[in-house]
């Protein structure tokens, strides 16, 4: 009987030790999240501001399909990702774009955009396997959204208004546009301001 | 004694031991929660204000009442003779808490800090919080029912170490609860595979 009691005590002590290790690890992950975040897309000086009506364009994709950019759309937002076949960062970002297309498919349509020689873009689409994305080539589109550096992304909400925009070098930058739209935060400064306010009010 | 009778008494003894261990866990959880509420009075007051929709003075009274009720329920659960009363009081506390959380959720107030985590991490109010309160309430009802069926006999208690293991079991389960609380407080990542 003493053996049974002793083994039970030992086992419960082991459970406690393992649970505490798990709690400490989870706490560390939480601290890391707090320290890393936020990684927002860099918003460049631009003519269009968050909340403005996005310019509308009726274009043709590389495969000849009609692509309507901007305007009111039923429960679906549009992400315009401006890239170039010469841009190494754009190429490195493509796996994240593919992943986002799957994860956010319920509310988001992703459109790839660029300008220049059509033949080069056609080859780029073939090499990178981008056939499932509408790919438009239009200089006016880039000008309309004030694109100066690549890769640059513009998120247009279902009402046709600019929800977020910025330079996107990583998956975190890309996701920050989605979070910006969901939380209604226009800029990283506004986000940090709100966080400080929340912390102050909770006395942390 | 027949095999079936031995099996039945074994099951009953294991059930009593498990009930004692769960009672110790719930008692420790209630006492730690009460201590946490006292140490973070401002947060508790705000949570009471937001969840109960009360004015500041009444919210302070509710926060104090909740802490006191938790401390009393925890203490009663630790005493075998008063375990049933402690368990029913605990079930009532968690049941009321669950109802308050559901009311806040129904009103669309997902930004409310329910004050229900030991850490400082903020996660939007959702199904996890009210389901946890409901699960704890159900667990307390089980302990209360088991305590009303009958106190453990001396021989059964000795056979399963029921006198010495509940405290260790309670601490172990409390450790698991704290770990889950920390995990639940983490900011969820967006969906999508590793790119």
Image (cartoon, rainbow, N blue to C red):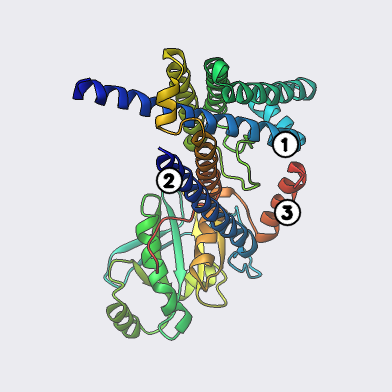
Instruction: Give coordinates of residue B145: x percent, y percent.
Output: 44, 16
Instruction: Report, in whole angstroms, how far the alpha carbon at label 3 lies from the one at label 2.
Output: 54 Å
Residue A126 is marked as: none
Q: Helix or strand or loop: what does disc 1 sit on?
A: helix
Q: Secondary structure at mark 3?
A: helix
Relative height, residue A149 to residue A61 (above, below): below
The residue under the point 30% across, 22% down is: B9
Quadrant housing residue B72: top right
Q: Chain of mark 3?
A: A
Q: Are marks 1 and 2 in contact (CB under 8 Å)?
A: no
Kindly report which numbered mark, 1 or 2, lies closer to the viewer in this rendering: 2
Q: Residue at x 32, y 78 (%)?
A: A128
* Quadrant position of the C terminus of chain B in the picture: bottom left
Q: Does B69 sit above or below residue A195? A: above
What percent of the width, then of the height, locates residue A97? Answer: 40, 67
Q: Position of residue B81 (x, y in %)?
A: 55, 16
Q: Are marks 1 and 3 in contact (CB under 8 Å)?
A: no
Residue A121 picture quarter: bottom left
Identified at 64% across, 31% down, the residue is B31
Q: Closer to the N terminus: mark 3 or mark 2?
A: 2
Q: Which residue is mark 3?
A: A193
User: Considering the numbered disc 2 on the image, is that residue within a helix, a strand or a loop?
Assistant: helix
Give the crowd class for mark 2: few <14, some 14-19, many >=20 residues within 10 Å: some
> Could you say which is closer to the camera, residue A62 or residue B96?
B96
| Numbered tag placed on residue A7 in the rendering | 2
The CA span between labels 1 and 3 is 21 Å
Q: Which mark is residue B43?
A: 1
Query: Is disc 3 on the same chain as disc 1?
Result: no
Mark 3 against mark 2, which lies toward the viewer?
A: 2
């Amino acid at each position: 009987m003493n053996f049974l009691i002793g083994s039970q005590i030992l086992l419960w002590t082991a459970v406690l030790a393992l649970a505490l290790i798990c709690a400490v690890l989870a706490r560390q992950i939480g601290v890391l999240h707090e320290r890393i975040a936020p990684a927002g897309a860099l918003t460049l000086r631009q003519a269009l501001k968050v909340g403005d009506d996005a310019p509308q364009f009726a274009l043709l994709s590389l495969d000849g399909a009609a692509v309507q950019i901007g305007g009111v759309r039923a429960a679906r937002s549009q992400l315009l990702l401006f890239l170039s076949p010469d841009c190494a960062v754009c190429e490195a970002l493509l796996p994240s774009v593919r992943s986002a297309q799957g994860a956010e498919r319920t509310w988001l349509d992703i459109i790839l955009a660029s300008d220049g020689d059509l033949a080069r873009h056609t080859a780029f689409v073939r090499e990178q396997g981008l056939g499932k994305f509408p790919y438009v080539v239009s200089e006016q589109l880039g000008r309309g959204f004030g694109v100066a550096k690549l890769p640059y992304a513009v998120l247009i909400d279902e009402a046709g208004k600019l929800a977020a925009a910025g330079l996107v070098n990583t998956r975190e930058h890309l996701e920050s546009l989605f979070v910006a739209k969901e939380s209604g935060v226009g800029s990283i400064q506004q986000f940090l301001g709100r966080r400080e306010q929340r912390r102050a009010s909770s006395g942390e | 004694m027949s095999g079936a009778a031995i099996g039945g008494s074994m099951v009953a003894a294991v059930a009593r031991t498990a009930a004692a261990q769960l009672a110790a866990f719930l008692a420790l959880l209630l006492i730690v929660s009460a201590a946490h509420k006292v140490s973070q009075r401002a947060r508790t007051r705000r949570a009471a204000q937001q969840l109960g929709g009360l004015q500041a003075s009444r919210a302070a009274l509710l926060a104090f009442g909740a802490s006191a009720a938790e401390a009393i329920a925890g203490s009663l659960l630790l005493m075998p003779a008063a375990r049933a009363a402690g368990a029913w009081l605990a079930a009532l506390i968690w049941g009321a808490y669950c109802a308050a959380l559901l009311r806040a959720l129904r009103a669309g107030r997902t930004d409310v800090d329910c004050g229900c985590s030991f850490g400082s991490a903020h996660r939007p109010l959702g199904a996890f919080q009210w389901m946890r309160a409901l699960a704890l309430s159900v667990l307390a009802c089980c302990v209360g029912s088991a305590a009303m069926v009958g106190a453990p006999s001396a021989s059964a208690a000795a056979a399963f170490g029921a006198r010495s293991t509940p405290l260790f079991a309670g601490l172990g389960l409390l450790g698991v609860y704290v770990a889950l609380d920390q995990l639940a407080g983490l900011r969820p990542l967006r969906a999508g595979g590793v790119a």
